[in-house]
Image: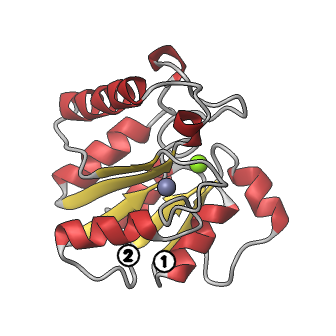
């Protein structure tokens, strides 16, 4: 199967250092919904792995997070596509879980769900922790310049990282 895994904040929707705490604050980046739909319609399974420590911090409840993901699924469906498995880490940095990126737990969950090896799968993110997560499980690290991407780029990237302007450019590359 053709599987691609995406980070959420800064890749699919605009990020904020103050967290995305409500459905109103969840605003798609231009072209991202269309990119997911195009990939899906071309036979790609598009999964999502997102750190959501705002849950542990009490900034927003799980129901609000689920509403954002319902919105995402609806918007992609309107374009004729489908979003695959969405996995979230609701824990804080001190909780010692094995899912909070850069730990690879969420990517492993996705691979187990679909019964495929992670090796070589593209993991698209905007933060160093995303790229590190990808490297830990032998995924292909892919950086987009949206969200924190420009800042991440300035810090220097792991060898072999692919860089694109945004998710639309990632999709364009995969669909050529
Ligand atoms: Mg991000
Ligand atoms: Zn976790």
Q: Circle 2 — which element?
A: loop
Vertical side of 139 occupied by 19: above or below: above
Answer left or right for 173 relative to 153. left
Q: Position of residue 22 (x, y in %)?
A: 50, 19
Q: Circle 1 — which element?
A: strand
Vertical side of 141 occupied by 89: above or below: above
Mark sitting on residue 121: 2
Crowd around label 2: few <14 · some 14–19 · many ≥20 (10 Å): many
Mark sitting on residue 118: none
Q: Outermost residue, front direction?
A: 95
- Which residue: 48% across, 44% down? 90
Q: Position of residue 156 (x, y in %)?
A: 80, 71
- Which residue: 69% across, 78% down? 158
Q: How is the image coloured?
A: secondary structure
The quadrant of the picture occupied by the N terminus is: bottom left
Crowd around label 1: few <14 · some 14–19 · many ≥20 (10 Å): many
Answer left or right for 134 relative to 150. left
- Which residue: 19% across, 68% down? 114
Q: Nearer the viewer, residue 103 or 121?
A: 103
Q: Is residue 172 visible?
A: no
Q: Position of residue 70 (x, y in %)?
A: 28, 29
| Residue linked to disc 1 | 140
Q: Position of residue 116 (x, y in %)?
A: 22, 78
Task: Give the alpha-carbon distance from disc 2 to disc 1, as whole Å.
Answer: 6 Å
Disc 2 to disc 1: CB gap under 8 Å: yes
Vertical side of 115 occupied by 53: above or below: above
Total numbered labels: 2
Q: Is residue 100 visible?
A: yes
The picture quadrant where one finds residue 102 is bottom right
């Amino acid at each position: 199967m053709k599987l691609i895994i995406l980070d959420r904040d800064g890749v699919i929707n605009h990020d904020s250092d103050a967290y995305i705490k409500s459905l109103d604050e969840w605003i798609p980046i231009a072209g991202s919904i269309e990119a997911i739909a195009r990939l899906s319609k071309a036979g790609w399974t598009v999964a999502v792995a997102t750190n959501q420590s705002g849950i542990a911090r009490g900034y927003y409840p799980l129901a609000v997070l689920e509403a954002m993901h319902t919105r995402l699924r609806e918007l992609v469906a309107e374009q004729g596509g489908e979003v695959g498995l969405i996995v979230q880490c609701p824990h804080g940095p001190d909780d010692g879980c094995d899912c909070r990126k850069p730990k690879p737990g969420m990517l492993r969950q996705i691979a187990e769900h679909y019964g495929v090896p992670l090796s070589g799968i593209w993991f698209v993110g905007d933060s160093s922790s995303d790229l590190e997560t990808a490297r830990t499980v032998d995924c292909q690290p892919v950086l987009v310049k949206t969200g924190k991407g420009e800042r991440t780029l300035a810090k220097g990237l792991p060898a072999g990282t692919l860089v694109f302007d945004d998710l639309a450019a990632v999709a364009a590359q995969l669909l050529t």
